[in-house]
Image (cartoon, helix red, strand yellow):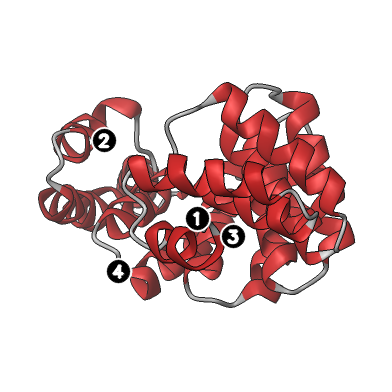
Amino acid sequence: MGKYMNKWMIILMCLVCISSFAQTTKLDFEPALKFAKDKQPTKAIETLLQIEKTKGPSADLYFYLGNSYLDLQQYDNALMAFSNAILNDKKYKEAIYNRANVYYFLKDYKKALEDFDIYISLDSLKSNAFYDRANTYFKLEKFEKAEKDFLSAIRLKANNDLTFFDLGNTYFKMQKLEDALRAFDKAIEINPNMSSYYFNRAIVEYNLDFPEDACADFQNAAELGDTEAAGYIKELCK
């Protein structure tokens, strides 16, 4: 009886060890998250890898690792970490979204698109996801799909000047010049301090045969620091 009792006690002790090894709490990650917040990603990574040794793997751990690698622009390591997070939790939408962005940075636009598709299937209310997928479509020269996603992003968040600017660039690629002009108008209405907005609107205005408007916008762009605009003023605005 004593022999069997000792055997069961050993098994129980092992189960307790396994259970404690596999579980992590938010408190475990606080030191690493503080390092990350304080712009010390290397220390955050060291802390997270130590947690992995003592507590074992978890989706959250790999997600936080991926974010710190991303801060260091170590894209291959970030990709591996986010992939491990997703292996531990297939519906970890934040990890899926961040991995999509890593693929984008690595110029693997098809894989980025796959992850953005999955993310949007899990959460269709995040304007940034539609915006990022639109830019991915733009890189793949699928301009009609890019237009659709930029418009979806605008419906969810109507005051983002950058979305209107990129929508304008998309319309320009599609040779929808009047639509491009309206998009750039809106971008400038929201944020009148970006030289690139005026410069691109000037290009559209010149193509629409509005030379005076184009010259005025080249001048606006130059005053905001666009060095290329001066050459256009010299050549086109005589």
Element assignment for label 4: loop
User: Alpha-carbon neighbours of circle 3 within 10 Å: few (<14), some, or many (≥20)?
Assistant: many
Q: Amino acid at mark 1?
A: Ala
Name the quadrant containing residue 187. top right
Element assignment for label 2: helix
Element assignment for label 3: helix
Q: Amino acid at mark 3?
A: Ala
Q: Amino acid at mark 4?
A: Gln
Q: Earlier in the sequence, mark 1 or mark 2?
A: 2
Q: Earlier in the sequence, mark 3 or mark 1?
A: 1
Task: Please name the residue that numbered disc 3 is placed on.
Answer: 100
How far apart in space, not on screen, are marks 1 and 2 (Cα)?
A: 15 Å
Compared with 193, 85 (above or below) is below
Element assignment for label 1: helix
User: Alpha-carbon neighbours of circle 1 within 10 Å: few (<14), some, or many (≥20)?
Assistant: many
Does the rendering let one see residue 110? yes
Which residue is found at the position 68% from the left and 60% from the top?
A: 115
How far apart in space, not on screen, are marks 2 and 4 (Cα)?
A: 21 Å
Residue 228 image offset from top left, x and y in percent: 40, 63
Which residue is found at the position 20% from the left and 54% from the top?
A: 45
Q: Earlier in the sequence, mark 2 or mark 3?
A: 2
How far apart in space, not on screen, are marks 4 and 3 (Cα)?
A: 15 Å
Q: Earlier in the sequence, mark 2 or mark 4?
A: 2
